[in-house]
Every structure is written in structure tokens, then in C-alpha cells.
Amino acid sequence: MSSKINSVKGTREFYPEQMFARNFIYAKVRAASELFGYQEYDGPFIEPLELYAAKSGEELVKKQSFTFEDRGGDLVTLRPELTPSLARMIAAKQGELNFPVRWWSFGPFWRYESPQRGRSREFFQWNIDLLGADSPEADAELIAVGATFLRSVGLSPERAQIFVNDRRLMEAQFDALGIAADKRVDASNLIDRRGKMTIAAWDEYALEIGLDRKQLDGLKAILGDFELWRQSESLTRLFAALAALGVSAYVKFDPNIVRGLLYYTGTVFEAFDVSGSVKRAIFGGGRYDNLLSDVGGQPLPATGFAMGDVVAGIILQEAGLIPEFQSSPAQVLVTVFDANLLPQSFALAAELRSAGLNAMVYPEPTKLQKQFKFADKMKMKVALVLGPDEAEQGLAVVKNLTTGEQAQVKKDAVFESVKEILQA
RNA sequence: GAGCCUGUAGCUCAAUGGCAGAGCGCCACACUGUGGAUGUGGAUGUUGUGGGUUCGAAACCCAUCAGGCUCCCCA
């Protein structure tokens, strides 16, 4: 008896049905990206730890990444995100790239977190970025790509919304309230947690981090002011561009969106499922104009977002938006009558394949009943039977499994006959 | 990293200290050249794992693993 070895905690196994769902998301991601002219790229799956330590809190990197020592004694980590790799790749070819650069990627990432609904330790993420443009219209384009994805998978604006804010606008508001520079990070955290705390607890927390009563009241007024964007020229242009791009229905200004990341410098946005059971962001991103120079490149404005496949997958599943899984790539089963006729069935299958048809042949002689049952469970459309009678006359039985009709046809007409059924 | 909940047949779940069950699925037969529907029969099993308490544990206790919810975090 061998002992059972579990998969690593937080990893996922993609059985064909889950693989189909993953590839469905991948295909939609590709379509939305390419519709706007973005090119696919990828970086290494393992990176030196320093790549992340440079711009993230070291504590965080050590705690939430899969880091290990390689045989040469260097600390390497399974990539927890793509942006630092992107920044390095861009910086390395900054002189020869044709800006603005529009790149997208869909690949695996790892974070050492406690797994729960919508969050695993191994996940796939769509990253899409536009580098070399600092206009609000560039931000609008990224938001439009996100909205296009939502629309393409069938998530309506009633179901999914993208909430937008601008850090510069919030900074201006903090200035007006006289919130000191060293309290800005705490204030951002405060805003981020607003939905998670009771009103009283939130007030208390606000006073705790050093806001006075007047600043708290002022902050509340700002967070309740959904017309605040009109004070921002950049957001005004952004919303005008979104209207021109035809995605206004998906986008709303929300002063409560700040995002945890330190590196955002302007526009920030997050998409949520507003009617389902998952409260996590579908995707999120924003403008990060300082990142390139932070990693040693020439200053370069950039904007982008990322979407994990776990939350998106749950939402699509819940909304019934993942197409029906086709259990077999082949819609045709060539049955095997008996051991003597097996070579003829194999040969028939081979002929159909060389004609370009996906065809499966039963791998051993067994009762036809069993073979038909197999074809039925695999949801196949056509079964072929080559028995002694047919073999003698150079025929094959073509059976339409949907209607139950069947006919004997000449072997060289099988392909056409099958095709007819599949196209019906 | 912290707290709470859950783990029983392939799946969904019963059984609350006293013979481990149901539905669905599976297999066989009715049907020796044909799937779905129906009927009849059959097998579902280390009750996550390891220990303990008890005459007796799926149930109670401890540990551990996995999943979920919440906090933390979300580069």
C-alpha cells in the first residue's frame, strides 16, 4: 500500500473541465487585449528575491512569497507579481522599444497566503500595461480594456462595475484638511478599511491614527461626495474619454477606492461584482509613473492593471457564464466490433483524421453496448460501426447519436456523411 | 500569523455514545450488432490521518492534515 501524497497546500489541480474554464478566461483575456493592440509577453517564473525587496516591504516579501535558496546559495522566489519583471524588461530595452508600449501577459503566480475562497497560493493572473504615455486618456484605455473583457464574458454593467479614483485628487483633499504628510499612508489605510468596520469603530480608528474631529468630519464628507471628480481636470478628461470609448456604463467615480499599493501615483481603479457573493476585486490597477526610475530605468509614465483567475472564475461560474464543457475534443467514435475487425476500425479512424476530422477509436474490442455508452457519456455526436457485414461490402454504419438514426454508407462516403451530421 | 466552523460511499448529505444509511452516480442482467428511458439485482466505506477516554466512538478529548468563514495582508 502506497501512502497518499497530497498536493501542496493552496495549489490547484486542473482537471479537463477546470482547464477548459481556465482556457476560456485566457481566450477572453487575449481577445480583449488584442482588440486594443496589446502584445503578449512573459517574464521568468522565478526571480531573485531582491527584485521584489527593492520596492516592497521586506517583511512582506519574506512572509508572503515562496522563497528558497538555490544550489548556488542565492535567494530566489517564485514570482508573486509581474510588474517588477516588466519594469526590468522595459528598462533593459528602453532605448530600442517603440513607445508607447502596450503589453499583456497571462501566467502563473505564487503567494504564500492562507488559502480561502477566491484566494489560493498558486493562481493565474492577467497583467496588462501601457508604458510611455501619461495622459488620462491612456488610463481610460486600460479601463476600457477591462470593461471590454467584462462585457465579452457576459458580465453586464448591472453585475460588474469599475470604480475609479485619483490619488492626486485625494492628496489635494488631504492638503485642504491639513492632514500631515506622515499620516497619509495611515489615512489611506483608513479609507481602505471603511467598508470592513462599523461606523463607530471606524471613527475611533480615525482618531487613533491622529486625525482630529474636524479632519474626520471633512474626510467623511469627501468620501460621500461622488461628484468630487469634477474638481479634477484629469478625471474629467478620463470620464470624457471613457464616454467616447463607449464604456461609461461600466465605470463610476468612487472616492473610497485608494488601493493598498504604495507605487500608484495617479488614477486608481478596481472592478467588483456588485451582485454576487464574492466581495473581492475582480481586477485592479492604476497609474504608476515612478516605478521605472525606481528600478533604475529612465523615468517613464506607466499605467496598467492585473486580474487573478480565481475570483474571476468563481464569479463567472456563479453567473453561469462559462460555456458548457465539451468533454471530448473528438465528436466521432469509431467502435471496434471484435479483435478481427479492430485493424479495420483503426484504419477507418486514421482515414478520417487525415481528412482533418477529430476522431476517437475505442482502444480494445469490447461489447458495442459499452462503447456506445462511453460515446454517450462523452457527449459525442457520431458513432461508427464496422461489423462483419459492413466489412464484407466495404461499408460502415454511421449513427447520429443525437437523433438515433443510422445508415450504412460506403467507406469513402463516411467522411462526408459524418461531416453532414456534425454541421447540422 | 490569530480566531471560529467543517471533514462519513465517486457526488450531495443522514446517523449525537449502541449493527454505518439514503438519494444520485457506478456495475451486472432484462438486451449475444447499438447509447440515452424503464425495471430487477449488486458493490459502495481504514467515517481525513494519528493517538486518547469508554464495555462500546463517525459522535467526546488531544494532536495533525485539508477545506471554508473572519481578522491580518493583498507587492
Image (tube, coloured by chain):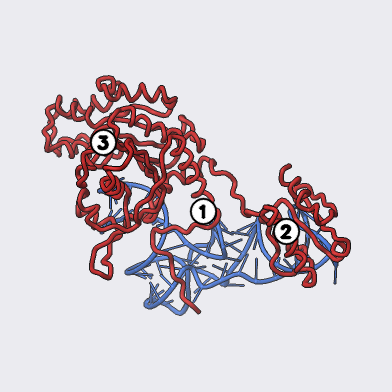
Q: Which residue is mark 1?
A: A19
For chain B, what colour was chosen?
blue
The amino acid type, in three-letter code, at marker 2 is Glu
Query: Which chain is painted in red?
Result: A
Nearer the N terminus, badge 3 or badge 2? 3
Dot 3 amino acid type: Pro
Q: Secondary structure at mark 2?
A: helix
- According to the image, label 3 marks what residue? A301
Q: Residue at the location (55% across, 53% down)? A: A17
Question: Chain for mark 2?
Answer: A
* Disc 3 + disc 1, Cβ < 8 Å: no
Q: Is residue A198 visible?
A: no
Position of residue A197 relative to residue A359, above or below, is: above
- Quarter-of-image position of residue A235: top left
Percent across and percent down for residue A422 are 72, 46
Q: Secondary structure at mark 1?
A: helix
Q: Return the residue nearer the eye: A231 or A2.
A: A231
Specify which label sits upstream in the sequence, 3 or 1: 1
Q: Which residue is mark 2?
A: A351
